[in-house]
Amino acid sequence: MIPQWSEALLLAGAFFTAAAAKAKASPLPFTIDVKTIDQGVAYGLMIVGLLVTYLMH
């Protein structure tokens, strides 16, 4: 059986992979898309929440 923390990491990896697949290649490498940043912050907070939850239990 897979431990809970590794399951959380697998789910987080799946979310990041899906987000990367949806992201379009920018013509300029340094252009900043606000929507992409917001999604990155949301995914980051979600992963922090998952890790804290699994560490607390």
Image (cartoon, grey):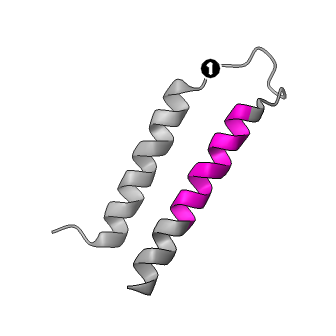
Q: In terms of image quadrants, where is residue 6?
A: bottom left
> The disc labelled 1 sits on which kind of residue?
Lys
On screen, residue 16 versus residue 24, left or right, reads left
Residue at 53% x, 58% y is 46
Residue at 38% x, 62% y is 8
- Please provide percent x and percent y for residue 57: 37, 85
| Above or below for 53 versus 15 | below
On screen, residue 44 versus residue 4, left or right, reads right
Which of the image's four quarters has the N terminus?
A: bottom left
| Above or below for 28 versus 30 | above
Q: Residue furthest left?
A: 1
Residue at 69% x, 42% y is 38
- Please provide percent x and percent y for residue 42: 61, 50
Magenta run includes residue 24: no
Label 1 packing within 10 angstroms: few (<14), some (14-19), many (20+): few
Return the residue at label 1.
24
Q: Main secondary structure of the magenta part?
A: helix
Q: Nearer the viewer, residue 28 or 35?
A: 35
Residue bounds of the magenta highlight: 35-48
Q: Nearer the viewer, residue 7 or 46?
A: 46
